[in-house]
Amino acid sequence: MTTHVIVGAGLAGAKAAQTLREEGFDGEIVLIGAESERPYERPPLSKEYLQGRSEREKIFVHPSGWYAEHGVRLRLGLRATGVDLDQHVVRLDDGSSQPYNKLLIATGATPRRLPGPAHYLRTVGDSEAIRERFAAGGRVIVVGAGWIGLESAAAARQAGCEVTILEPEPTPLHRALGPELGDVFAALHRRHGVGLRLGTGVADITETGVRLSTGERLDADVVVAGVGAVPETGLAREAGLEVGEGILTDASLRTSHPDVFAAGDVAEAFHPLYGRRIRVEHWANALNGGPVAARAMLGQDAVYDKIPYFYTDQYELGMEFSGDITGYDEVVYRGSVEDLDFIAYWLRDRRVIAGMNVNRWDVVREIQDLIRSGAAIDPKELSSD
Ligand SMILES: Cc1cc2nc3c(=O)[nH]c(=O)nc-3n(C[C@H](O)[C@H](O)[C@H](O)COP(=O)(O)OP(=O)(O)OC[C@H]3O[C@@H](n4cnc5c(N)ncnc54)[C@H](O)[C@@H]3O)c2cc1C
């Protein structure tokens, strides 16, 4: 019997397994995951689940019976330790081996660590541990004003903690959004009573707080660090697959070996629109990339060409972001930034390369069509409601 194996039981892996069945694959599907939980979604872990506003059952990708019902053999609490590309075998940390015909690597990413004791937020267990600490109140220091840092800060404020965010860049989300929109998030958090120390690096973390690069000490009851993630490429690298920052793939998510594919956070895939490889750590990339890899595993002509898409909720701000701001030379607004009711467009040579809708909905398609068209546009046209 043909066996397709997926290593990494996260969103990309679970959606790939689902697509294999939906596309009529009637062989064996084995989904291997290092965590003890069945596949779940991570966005709630820094939002409603962290704030205690959502039940645990809601985070899972499929109901618990789904895997058996669809003939997907879910092997949890097992780590793949090696892949023999010639023999078509995955080695597992219980000493067994799992043969495959086609293999998907969807091993995600793991938080970048700082020296010293801090909480990191990647798993459901991490979210529960942090929620418990926030519920106890006290002083929280968040290291890093990226998405996870800001969402954690919002949850800590909503739990009534005193919160300080430390960030070496001049604004939050500096690389993702640039300074203009970074300032919007800085103002939002300040309005909610968060102390923002920008341009401030951390030298080390101790049991009682942090020491800043300036030598100053700040006391804290809890330190949460959100300083980026590192893709889990070890398996691919050791197997001899081509790896850059992520596992290198073509637009069909096929790696340098024809029977091995990669999807989700771990993949650095050729994107037809950008004409280069990109690695995207967003929910939608796992949601849509897993199915494309599955179709390619079945020999279909599948191409992943979605525009990167991200969303966040912090306090009263809900937003969706599409595109990539690299190289922008102008930001144009439609609506009211002050009232948090607007769309921001990032332009390069008068072409829209990214857009963010804040508390305005059903406009993502329109924004993405503008990005995809590559057409020059009059900024005045963009800014008029
Ligand atoms: C707290 C948090 C909040 C987020 N919020 C948002 C958001 O609001 N919007 C958004 O767009 N994105 C968000 N993201 C990003 C999004 O969740 C990720 O892009 C997505 O989870 C990636 O899915 P994945 O399947 O590629 O990887 P993962 O979900 O990381 O799954 C990979 C799985 O593989 C397992 N694994 C790794 N190595 C092995 C191995 N050798 N053997 C077996 N198993 C292995 C891991 O344990 C993990 O369970 C958030 C991420 C986090 C952590």
Image: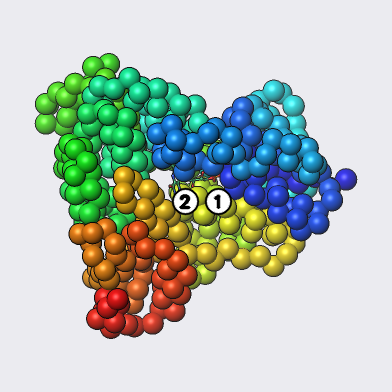
**Ligand 1 closer than 8 Å to label 1 CB:** yes
Q: Quadrant of the C terminus?
A: bottom left
- Residue behind mark 2: 282
Q: Which residue is pictured at 43% across the width and 39% down the height?
A: 48
Q: Is residue 168 visible?
A: no
Q: Quadrant of the N terminus?
A: top right
- Residue 163 at x, y percent in the picture: 23, 32
Q: Which residue is pictured at 51% across the width and 54% down the height?
A: 284
SS for callout 2: loop
Q: Which residue is pictured at 41% across the width and 40% down the height?
A: 47
- Residue behind mark 1: 286
Vertical placement of residue 62 versus 331, above or below: above
- What amino acid type is highlighted by mark number 1? Ala
**Dot 2 and dot 1 residues touching (CB under 8 Å):** yes
Q: Which residue is pictured at 59% across the width and 34% down the height?
A: 57
151 or 160, nearer to the observer: 160
